[in-house]
Amino acid sequence: MSADANDQCMSVAQQWIRPEIRELSAYHVPDASGLIKLDAMENPYSWPEQLVDQWLESLRGAAINRYPDPDARQLVDDLRDVYAIPQQAGILLGNGSDELIQLITMAVSGSMSSGSMSSGSISESNATRTIVTLEPGFSMYRMIATFTGMDYVGVPLRNDFTLDLESLLAAIETHQPAVVFIAYPNNPTGNLFDLEDVRQVIEVSPGMVVVDEAYFAFAGTTVMPLLDQYENLLVLRTLSKMGLAGLRLGFLAASSECIEEFNKIRLPYNINILTQISASFALQHHDIFEQQTACLRKDRESLLSALSTHASLTVYPSQANFILFRTAQGQAEQIFDHLLEQGVLIKNLHKSGGALLDCLRVTVGTAEENDAFLQALNSALIDVVETR
Ligand SMILES: *Cc1c(COP(=O)(O)O)cnc(C)c1O
């Protein structure tokens, strides 16, 4: 076949979409209608009716015909107050923290000019810039690194998913990454790394260290106060997991110099007016979220101990609103399917392979949902054993 004929057989997508993008698989979200949804780390609780009325009232004045405040100043001020973000730090808002991961990555991707090289640790003058993170980790880091054309290095956690600090420091030394991403607590493992280890990573990193605190509400620890000490520290948060996943709001706190640069590539008006008003309203009623997340933390402990009674499961410690567990070899798919048949949707991580073989992840729901899950799990475990 001639090159021309070959071209004619190719679809527009095949011909023009970059191969590394065609090779990606889209982030898959399963249909959860009619199911008990314990797959996505959502807060299961809604607001008291009276609060819902007040919220809807606050939206009445929204000038929906106008573009929103491009800098969302009111919301930024509210976030600064509620989350004790140091005064000198800059704040950037994203349509979910996913958007901020993308912004950071886009700002650093591309080749390094030889002028910007640090003392010869990478010899080629046009080396592609690198992202270093931990694995298993949040899948979006790899996806975004891939589609922004960056090199990606995933440093394995130890078998028990604790941090292998030596390997991480060695990878940073070798690859001189533009960005290190650390989810703190980690997703999908749920554990919190040692703060002193994270501090060492920040100290030895030549580039930026993004500490992704998506599960801050469930861990209670934060590196936010360290912003004053480290110019290369970026703290990423989201309102999604604490109870506002539908709003899509994330924020990044970092040196105002970095924030100003990121801000140049942010698309204007990325935070719509309904999100601006609703998030500010929610932050004024932050005590509700504190009650709800406290309840989820307590129920997480009950769920952890209930899961631990099953001898065939390995249950990993969690400082987040989900629990990772490993089934006996080769049983994860079957258990996942049995749960689904009983109307309970959790996350099947077995498919990711590697260190996550035989692993499932359940989000902490309401007490009733957790009970339904535990009951379904009981019968799944019995069925799986019986069909062997
Ligand atoms: C869920 C999650 C995010 C993304 O949250 P958004 O909903 O996009 O704000 C980011 N990082 C980690 C580690 C997460 O688990």
Image (tube, helix red, strand yellow):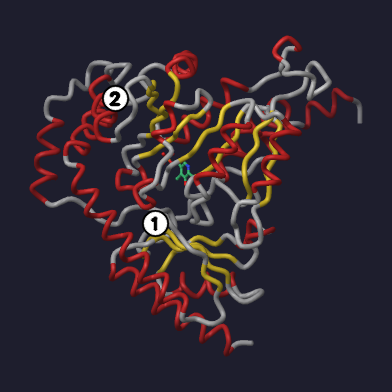
Name the residue located 62 percent from the left edge and 68 percent from the top edge: 358
Mark 1 element type: loop
Q: What is the quadrant of residue 128 in the picture?
A: top right
Amino acid type indicated by mark 2 = Val
Give above or below for 147 relative to 196. Answer: above
Farthest residue, direction top: 115
Name the residue located 14 percent from the left edge and 38 percent from the top edge: 55
Q: Which mark is residue 76?
A: 2
Amino acid type indicated by mark 1 = Asn
Q: Earlier in the sequence, mark 2 or mark 1?
A: 2
Name the residue located 13 percent from the left edge and 37 percent from the top edge: 56
In the rendered structure, the answer to whether residue 360 lies left or right of residue 260 reads right
In the rendered structure, the answer to whether residue 232 lies left or right of residue 110 reads left
Q: Please state, as top left, top right, bottom left or bottom right, where the C terminus lies in the image.
A: bottom right
Name the residue located 31 percent from the left edge and 60 percent from the top edge: 296
Q: Is the shortest distance between ligand 1 and the CB of mark 1 under 8 Å?
A: no
The residue to which callout 1 is attached is 321
Give above or below for 282 relative to 2. Answer: below
Residue 173 image position (x, y, % from top left)? 72, 33
Residue 254 image position (x, y, % from top left)? 44, 25
Q: Is the shortest distance between ligand 1 and the CB of mark 2 under 8 Å?
A: no
Residue 184 image position (x, y, % from top left)? 48, 46
Quadrant of ligand 1 in image: top left
